Amino acid sequence: MKTTLDELQAFTAVVDTGSLSSAAVQLGRTASGVSRALSRLETKLATTLLRRTTRRLELTEEGAAFLIQARRILEAVEEAEEQMSRRLQQPAGRLRVNASAPFMLHVLVPLTGGFRERYPDIELELHSSDQIIDLLEHRTDLALRHGPLRDSSLHARPLGRSRIRAVASPDYLARRGTPQQVEDLENHSLIGFTQPESLNHWPLRHSLGEAWSIVPSVWASSGETVRQLALAGEGVACLSDFMTARDRAEGALVEILPDANTHVLQPIHAVYYRNTALSARITCFLDYLSECLGEQAWTRHG
C-alpha cells in the first residue's frame, strides 16, 4: 500500500475543518506538514483531491469518492485498536472533555478523582467554556451540555435533568425583604445573563403567564459569576440545582417564590461526533457519569 495513515488523516482533517491551518491545529501538526502530506497523497494517487480557491478548499469529484474510502480505513484502524484495548480491559489514551465552567466546577471536578482511580490509564484533558464549541475544531471527544440541544449533527446521550430555581442570599433578603409574589421582583436587584436571552426568562408563574421576563440590574456572561454575585448578596438569581444544591443545603442561598416555580427541568446531555461504535474511554466516562449523577441529590428534583 502506497498511501499512509498519516496522509489519510491529513486529508480527512482538512475536509472536516475546511482549511490547512485548522487541520494542523486538530492534528497537532504544522500547516506546512499537513500540506506536504496532502501533496504526497495526491501525487501517489495521480489525481487532485482538493481544489484550492481563494476562499476555501473544495473536494473534487475524485476527492469526494476517495473520502468515503479514507474514512472507512481510518475508522477500521481505530476500531481495531479499540477492540484490543477492550480485550485487555484497560481503556487508555487521552480523553478531551468540554463543559461550561459551572458544570465543570460543580459536577465534573468532584467526580474526577473517582474516575481516575477506576481508569488510571485514561488521561483526562478538561476544558471549560461558557459558549457552545465546535467539537472537531477544538479536538474535543465529547462535551457536557445543559439546556436544549441545538446541533442535530451530534449524537447525544441524556445524563439527567436539573431543576431551575430563583435564589438569593439570606443577607440580601434581610436587607431588601423577601418577595411574596412574582410581581415583587420589579422592586429587587436581579442578576441576569448577557446571553442567551432565554436564561432571563425565569420559570415563575404569575397572573399573565408561566414565565417572568426580567430586566437585570447586573449582567454576567458566566453562570458561575451569577452564582458568586448571588452569594455576595448582590441580588436575586435564577440558577440550576447542580450549581446551587450545596449552597441551599448549607444556607448560603435560599429559594424564593417556591410556590410560583413551574418546575422546569434543564436536560443534561453528553454530545459527541461518532459514526461507529464509541471508543472504550468515552464509553467508560459516560457510564461513570451516569452512575454518579444518578446518586446526586439534585437529580431527584427535591
Image (tube, rainbow, N blue to C red):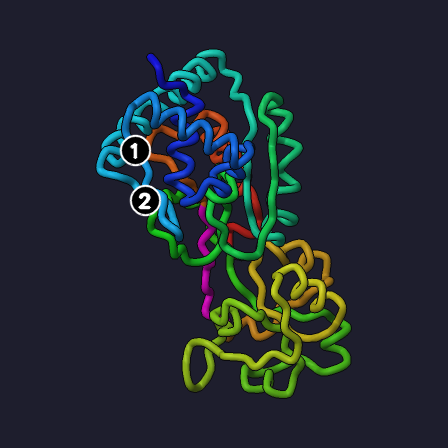
Q: Earlier in the sequence, mark 1 or mark 2?
A: 1
Q: Nearer the viewer, mark 1 or mark 2?
A: 1
Taking the spot 63% from the left edge, 36% from the top edge, the residue there is 112
In terms of depth relative to the viewer, which is nearer, 188 or 249? 188
The answer to whether residue 246 shows anywhere in this view is yes
In terms of depth relative to the viewer, which is nearer, 56 or 105? 56
> Which class describes the residues within 10 Å of circle 2: few (<14), some (14-19), or many (20+)?
some
Mark carried by residue 244:
none
The residue type indicated by label 1 comes to Thr
The image shows residue 107, relative to residue 190, as above or below, that is: above
The residue singled out by tag 2 in the image is 58
Q: CA distance from mark 1 to mark 2?
A: 11 Å
Membership of 227 in magenta stretch = no
In terms of depth relative to the viewer, which is nearer, 80 or 189? 80
Determine the image quadrant of residue 214. Answer: bottom right
Mark carried by residue 48:
1
Determine the image quadrant of residue 118. Answer: top right
Q: Secondary structure at mark 1?
A: loop
Is residue 298 rendered to the left or right of residue 148?
right
Q: Position of residue 286 (x, y in %)?
A: 48, 35
Taking the spot 42% from the left edge, 36% from the top edge, the residue there is 13
Q: Secondary structure at mark 2?
A: strand
Is residue 257 rendered to the left or right of residue 1?
right
Q: Position of residue 285 (x, y in %)?
A: 51, 33
Q: Position of residue 160 (x, y in %)?
A: 46, 48
User: Which image quadrant: the C terminus?
Assistant: bottom right
The residue type indicated by label 2 comes to Glu
Specify the segment rendered in magenta. 261-269
> Which class describes the residues within 10 Å of circle 1: few (<14), some (14-19), or many (20+)?
some
Q: Are marks 1 and 2 in contact (CB under 8 Å)?
A: no
User: Which image quadrant: the N terminus?
Assistant: top left
